[in-house]
Amino acid sequence: MKEKKAQANLIANGKCELVVPEADSYQALLEVKDRKDAIEGIKNGLKSMKGERGKSATDFFREFFAENGIPEQE
C-alpha cells in the first residue's frame, strides 16, 4: 500500500484556490527541474560545439588571463 503525502488546500468561497504540496515532494520537484535545466544546458553546449560556434579551452583561458591581468603559467 502506498502512503499518501500530506498537502494543504486553501479553500475560498467553496472552491480550492491553492494547493500547497508537502515539503519533501516540493523539494523533489525542484531537484527534477534543476536536473532538467542542467541537461538542457549540456545539450545546448554540445549542439554549439558541433556547429563550431564555441572556442577551445586554450583560447578561452588565454583571453581570460589577458583580460584579468593574470600571468599565464607554463
Image: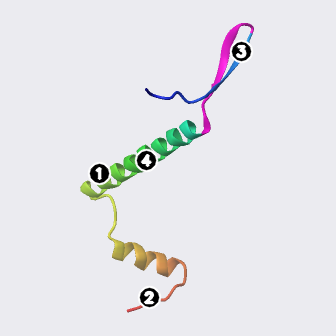
Mark 2 crowd level (few <14, some 14–19, many ≥20, 10 Å Cα): few
Q: Amino acid at mark 1?
A: Lys
The Cα–Cα distance between marks 3 and 2, rounded to whole angstroms, is: 63 Å
Disc assigned to residue 66: none
SS state under label 2: loop
Q: Extreme front residue here?
A: 1
- Sequence order check: which comes first, mark 4 or mark 3? 3
In the image, residue 31 lies in the stretch drawn in magenta: no
The Cα–Cα distance between marks 4 and 3, rounded to whole angstroms, is: 33 Å
Q: Extreme left residue here?
A: 50
- Residue at image mark 4: 35
Q: Position of residue 28 (x, y in %)?
A: 51, 41
- Residue at image mark 1: 47
- Residue at image mark 3: 11
Q: Quadrant of the C terminus?
A: bottom left
SS state under label 4: helix
- Sequence order check: which comes first, mark 1 or mark 2? 1
9 is higher (above) or lower (below) than 43? above
Which is more foreground, mark 1 or mark 4? 4
Find residue 63 and report its image quarter. bottom left
- Residue at image mark 2: 72
Image: magenta residue range:
13-23
